[in-house]
Image: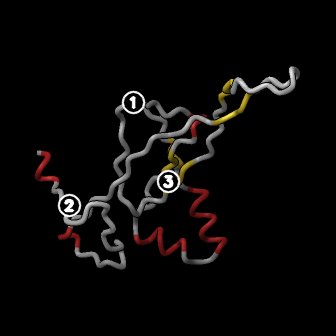
Amino acid sequence: QDITEDMGPTVVLQGTNSQTVHQQLKGSVAGRNRMLEEKVYLRCTMQKGDAIVMDARTLHYGSANTSHTTTDTGLREDPADMGTISTGTRRVLLYFTIRNPRHGSTNADFPGCNSLWKGLELSTRDYY
């Protein structure tokens, strides 16, 4: 599925995965706002088959889906009623997290695993 500008692509704030940036987020409102104003905001429009790979600590968010399509419902009680509904185009998303156990971080940095498949373990070694 292509992700177009009007579908509300993910926005990534470049260079926000550092401890320094996260400390600034916990600081004064003025300091946080200044830091956020200085960051580059990347809108990730994509073509079918593309992927975003980023550090989970990178600040990111989904932007507003402003796409609108009109669908004929076929239901018309009143001849003046056009029988249509307006809906947005939905994004399909697959999300997963990879953690390097040798990183030296604690579970406070990365919350525990809440996998849908208990016992599932994958390694990047499996994909070389």
Relative to 95, say whether 35 is above or below: below
Q: Tell me the quarter of the image containing the C terminus.
A: top left
Indicate the amino acid at tag 2. Leu
Tag 2's secondary structure?
loop
- Between residue 27 and residue 102, name the one nearer to us: 102
The x and y percentages for residue 117 are 26, 60
- 2 or 1: tag closer to the N-terminus: 1
Q: Quadrant of residue 83?
A: top right
Q: Amino acid at mark 3?
A: Leu
Residue that carries the numbered disc 2 in the rendered image: 120
Which residue is at a point 36% across and 79% down the rendered structure image? 108
Q: Nearer the viewer, residue 76 or 59?
A: 76
Q: Position of residue 96 (x, y in %)?
A: 33, 55
Q: Quadrant of the N terminus?
A: top left
Callout 1, which amino acid? Answer: Lys
Residue linked to disc 1: 48
What residue is shown at x 48% (from left), y 51% (from top)?
A: 12
Circle nearer the viewer, 3 or 1: 1
Please state the horizontal and vertical placement of residue 120, each as a whole percent of the image. 20, 61
**Which residue sits at x=62%, y=41%?**
65
Instruction: Depth check: give the residue in front, 72 or 60.
Output: 72
Residue 101 relative to residue 53: left or right: left
Q: Which residue is mark 3?
A: 13
Give 70 or 96, whichever is nearer the viewer. Answer: 70
Query: Dot 3 lies on which element?
Result: strand
Q: Are marks 2 and 1 in contact (CB under 8 Å)?
A: no
Cα distance, mark 3 to mark 2? 31 Å
- Please report contact status of discs 3 and 1: CB closer than 8 Å, yes or no: no
Looking at the image, is mark 3 or mark 2 earlier in the sequence? 3
